[in-house]
Amino acid sequence: MLNNPKMRLEEIDSRLKELPQGTLTYKTINGKKQPYIQRTIQGKSQSVYVKLEGREKILLEFQERKSLEEEKKRLLKYYETLKDILKENPYLDAQVGCGYQDFRDFACGQQFYVDKTHFITQWLRSREKVTLITRPRRFGKTTLLSTVENFLDPACAGHPEYFEKLKVWKSEQSRKCYGTIPTVSVSFGSCKGMNYAQAVRGMISGLFNMYEIHNELLKSEILDAEDKEAYRSMREKLWHRENNNIEMAIPELCRLLYKHYGTKPVILLDEYDTPLLEAYTDGYWDEMIGTCRQMFHSAFKENNYYSRAIITGVTRVSKNSLFSDLNNIKVATVTCDEYSDCFGFTEQEVKDALMCQSVDQMQEVKKMYDGFIFGSHKDIYNPWSICNYLIDGELLSYWTNTSSNKLVGDIIRKHPMRSKHEIEQLMAGEVVHKEINENITFQYLDGDENSLWSLLLAVGYIKADNVKKKGEITECDVSVTNQEVMGMFRSQIREMVKNGDSVYRDFVYALMNHKTELLSEILTEVAYTSMSYFDTGKGPAERTPENFYHGLVLGLIVSLRDQYRIVSNRESGMGRYDIAMYPLQKDLDAFILEFKVMNEKKEKEIEDTARNALLQIEEKAYETDLLAAGIPREKIYKLGIAFVGKNALVMEQQ
């Protein structure tokens, strides 16, 4: 920790006044060196002799003076740097707090605040009617929407000092909008419950708070008696938690605000996907998706009384599920460049914050918390972790303990086989290349492997680098976000993966003991419990059944890495085998695995497909590399693994 620079400078100046002035020199008198203090008084140089008994004290005092003067130079430079930082981000030196979300709690330096108000300027310049922004939890979405509300809404006007030092105030266009646009602000963050009724009560509570904010409408001289009665009636229904006609709550308030102010309001909807995430995990999806679809249709499609809208959440719910009526929506996910530095702290902001808070531990902080990537912005930090670290001074896992992982856990448990191999790679610190559709299609979560990776990316457990967009598909290299998340991965995620361990043990037992009938049964059982039409039916090349089973078997044998060198898609002989297992001990057998999907035009039975797989191993001489590695021919076993739909058959040949 660094000392308070202002106080330390005052201490140094006070002490320097007490110490001897001038320069310490020596003169030789009668063959002896004598210490003198050389001073300049009224333009004349004077030498003051230091008596022998005071010599040691003087020497120490001059040594102290030199040290203090050097420290003063360092502190002055540090202090000047702080002033430059605070010109750009004026409240980094304020007291740090956690759990605050209302912009007014931060205004004018009441709390530590990282200025993200350039978002307002960027958004005002854009032309999108509806903007959906997805970011992981605790990345400042709620605070930023509160900032937008306090900047735009006439009811919050009258305090320009809240913004005068912030980035948004530097834009003339933005200043003109201050306090001129009413806002309809609502959060669905409390829409949680074990059943639909409980969850909807939470949603209604958010809508009631939305109405309470605008009770100025009851005093309006522009609204007539019928309008005021409409306001009272809707507020009364929401107060009593009545869920009939709640889809009209947002458009009705927009109408009243437009009539009162003469300006169409902006809609700010926070945590829009919380009701859907809760509904999926707790089993009332059909009821909740119906309610949300109706509400969003009324608020954003049929509503003629709003100008623009900002929606925030963690996930990007498929347009077909929720936004099917909206063709004017702009989506900014974690892989998009739009607003990429507006959520979370950039590395420079963290460096500046640590300096302003007198903390000198940037290397340690970077090692623990750096790693999030938003669009082209790398080195993004989670605000929750940084603020907690500034308060506690300890490098702990703060962010990963703030929310339940039950949705991710459910998906992993439903797809344990195909995902285990790649999850093990992630936990080993490796990079996995994936093609991900960032849309979350809840109807297919149980059968679509992509849903797991989409969720891991959306919630911030993995990061996407080297991103290439191909329509709805995001091709990228994924890895665990940072050291803090890795700790969670190696504990919580590992426990989730253990769900399928009995299947892994059975598969390994059958493989090592050459029980092909049992291998066939296990693969067929896994296929029927975890495969969907998208895995077994026709589709793009990257989603063929052969690739699915290839990944599945890799996941099932990954636990043998301490006994085998497992190689996938490697050239050997005159072709490229699917999987080869090189034993690390002389007493173990080697294996070559070849996968084939039944060609109904050429093969009548699945047995024909398995035999053709074995024939390919022989014709292509796939065993060449294993023989070259010194493995005896009699220790090499070849497996032809055939598939048709969800049925599997394994044949073995030594």
Image (cartoon, rainbow, N blue to C red):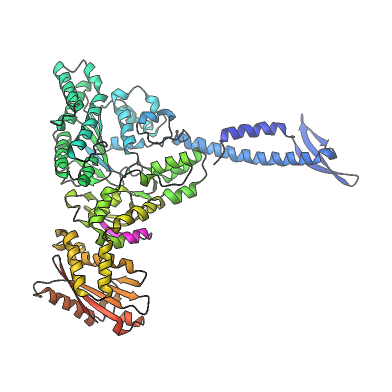
Q: Position of residue 625 (x, y in %)?
A: 32, 79
Vertical arrangement, residue 70 with respect to residue 209, above or below: below
- In this picture, residue 213 sits left or right of residue 392: left
Q: Position of residue 506 (x, y in %)?
A: 25, 68
Vertical arrangement, residue 549 with respect to residue 386, above or below: below
Q: Nearer the viewer, residue 322 or 13?
A: 322
Q: Quadrant of residue 388?
A: top left
Q: Position of residue 280 (x, y in %)?
A: 20, 46
Quadrant (top left/top right/bottom left/bottom right) for the N terminus:
top right
Give the magenta part as a residue range: 423-435
Q: Residue visible at 46% across and 38% down?
A: 391
Residue 78: in magenta span: no
Q: Quadrant of residue 57?
A: top right
Q: Residue visible at 62% across and 38% down?
A: 72
Residue 425: in magenta span: yes
Q: Nearer the viewer, residue 346 or 617?
A: 617
Vertical arrangement, residue 568 with respect to residue 126, above or below: below
Whether residue 446 is visible here, answered yes or no, is yes
